[in-house]
Amino acid sequence: MQQQIEIFLQPGEYFVGGAEYRVRTLLGSCVSVALWHPTRRIGGMSHFLLAEGGRNSLPTLDGRYGNDALRLLLRGLSASSVEPRQCQAKLVGGGSMFPRHQSGRAMHIGQKNGEAARSLLAEHGIPIVSESLFGAGHRQVVFDIATGDVWVRQVRPVGLHGETPGGTV
């Protein structure tokens, strides 16, 4: 069995590659979109901080924002001759990092990020096959491009009943 190459995504980064890669990240209110082509075993994952950003005068796409991060992923997949609509999407993240300080009326950043990811994927006709969104605390995420599996371990803030057992989404 071939050893996989580990990639760790920092906030604002994305990665597209083949079955020899395993992509990891750590998410709080940020969201990762994992796209995977089941036949070709090519996939990609993003780690975005905010749903969308002001364009200011930036001529390039910025992976810190969900709308741009998805475009970057789609470009990477297209460069590998992968049709995005043939991919499966898995969404992870959007946690509330300070649940005791959240207003009951205001949607927190993580919620906005998760809803934006859902909407962006729908706009591009990419089906969401699973998600691990929202709740309290951060998540450790591993995306195995060889199998399409995304493993998630959610850790709740201290005083909120420990951590949620990890699992595959």
Image (cartoon, helix red, strand yellow):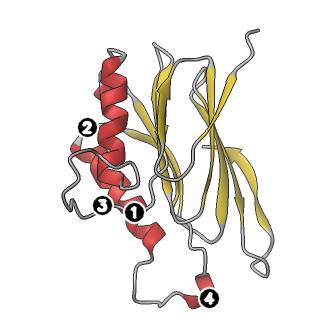
Element marked by disc 1: loop
C-alpha distance separating marks 3 and 4: 26 Å
Element marked by disc 2: loop
At x 32%, y 19%, the residue is 79
Q: Which mark is residue 125?
A: 2
At x 62%, y 88%, the residue is 100
C-alpha distance separating marks 1 and 4: 21 Å
Closer mark to the observer between disc 2 and disc 1: 1
At x 40%, y 89%, the residue is 105
Q: Which residue is mark 1?
A: 50
2 or 4: tag closer to the N-terminus? 4
Query: Label 3: few (<14), some or many (≥20) within 10 Å?
Result: some
Q: What's under tag 1, amino acid-wise?
A: Leu
Query: Label 4: few (<14), some or many (≥20) within 10 Å?
Result: few
Q: Which residue is mark 4?
A: 100
Verify CB contact (< 8 Å) between mark 1 and mark 3: yes
Q: What's under tag 3, amino acid-wise?
A: Glu
